[in-house]
Amino acid sequence: MPPEEIPYKRSRFSTRLLEHRLYTAGHSWLEQEDEDVWRVGFTKFAVRMLGEIVELGFETAPGTPVETGQVIGWLEGFKAVTDMFSPLPGRFEGFNSAMNEAESVRLLTTDPYGRGWLFRVRGRPGDECMDVQGYISLLDTTIDKMLGQRHE
């Protein structure tokens, strides 16, 4: 049975979120691949805020221990440059090799929840990661702030 998709729409932003994934306040998603291996990517909201992605790079070698919040790479879009952070403590298992090709960075905007994933970490997510309902609440609050409204 495929994972349940939850449609989300607020103002002019819409996406589909997968119920079985975890999410972070930094707008990353985590999907468990193996007992302790998590694939990580940016949510559609994060990608939209960055604009068209033009380049990315990783500063962390596979096998390197990482901590939650540690910078492991960077991403440049037309609107902004941002660091990529590890959303969990553990061991960096490597980046998505499809991202090596210049044209494949487009996968971040065309398929952020599928082939556009960024990297893998072996470890266990902490309490700062949230389920899909927690992420929906975060999106509501974030978008309300962007619109100049207070979230009740």
Image: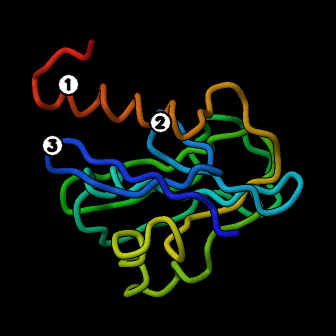
Quarter of the image for residue 131 reads: top right
Say left or right for 119 vs 141: right
Colour basis: rainbow
At label 2, the amino acid type is: Tyr
Give the distance between the C-alpha atoms of the residues marked 1 and 2, in whole angstroms.
15 Å
Q: Secondary structure at mark 1?
A: helix
Instruction: Residue at 46%, 52% (x, y): give it.
Output: 6
First along the sequence among labels 1 and 3: 3
Say left or right for 1 vs 63: left
First along the sequence among labels 1 and 2: 2
Residue 11's tag is 3
Report the front residue among 91 and 87. 87
Residue 135's tag is 2
Horizontal and vertical percent position of residue 38: 73, 55
Instruction: Residue at 47%, 33% (x, y): give it.
Output: 25
Per the image, the residue denoted by label 1 is 145
Q: Is residue 82 above or below residue 136?
A: below
The residue mark sitting in front, 1 or 2, is 2
Q: Quadrant of the C terminus?
A: top left
